[in-house]
Amino acid sequence: MKLMSLKQYMSMSKPALIRKIMKTLRAMPKKKLALACYNISKSKLPRLKFTPIPSSKLRKGTISYKMALRDERKRKALPATPTELQRRQTVQYWQGKTKRKTKRKTKKIVGKIYYTKKGQPYKILASGKARFLKR
């Protein structure tokens, strides 16, 4: 299937576009189709707007003041406690470790026999030089 430009799709008739979309939808798995349907219906819902109370207008010690501080922490993505910070850092550390690609070794091992593309054997010496071997 070739990728078409928007201009090409705009030149197509409406029934042709509907046929193309229906063909794609029929081939799509049920799970993916259900997720697409959910996202379409969710996008039509109204957005909820949250206006936080500035902490300068709140009295210290009250429940609403503590809730406002908690909301500010959430917005700034600050951890609630030092142990929480440490936990997040360790999780980030291990996620970074697992995502790294393994590097291929380019160094050759001394004494091991390698073969050229043509199949000729050679050995790496302790000095780092290579010596061809007799077959």
Image (cartoon, rainbow, N blue to C red):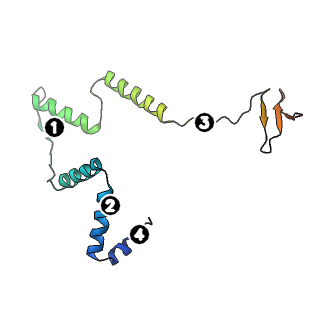
| Nearest to the observer: residue 64 or residue 29 | 29
In this view, the mark in front (2 or 1)? 2
In the rendered structure, find residue 56 and report the number of the disc placed on it. 1
Q: Whole-Å distance between the Cαs marked 2 and 3?
A: 40 Å
The quadrant in which the N terminus is found is bottom left
Q: Label 3 amino acid?
A: Lys
Does label 2 or label 3 sit earlier along the sequence?
2
Q: Amino acid at mark 4?
A: Met
Q: Is residue 41 left or right of residue 89?
A: left
Q: Residue at x 41, y 31 (%)?
A: 92
Seen in the picture, residue 79 relative to 41 is either above or below; the reply is: above
Marks 2, 4: nearer the viewer: 2
Q: In the rendered structure, which disc, 3 or 1, sits on the residue that comes first in sequence?
A: 1
Which quarter of the picture shows residue 115?
top right
Extreme residue toward the right, this view: 134
Q: Which residue does the numbered mark 4 point to in the structure image? A: 4
Element on which disc 2 rests: helix
Question: Which secondary structure, mark 1?
Answer: helix
Q: Is residue 47 left or right of residue 3?
A: left
Q: CA distance from mark 4 to mark 3?
A: 38 Å
Q: Amino acid at mark 1?
A: Ser
Q: Which residue is mark 2?
A: 24
Residue at the spot of label 3: 103
Q: Residue at x 15, y 37 (%)?
A: 56
Picture coordinates of residue 94, whole percent (x, y): 44, 28
Q: Nearer the viewer, mark 4 or mark 3?
A: 4
| Label 2 vs 4, first from the N-terminus | 4
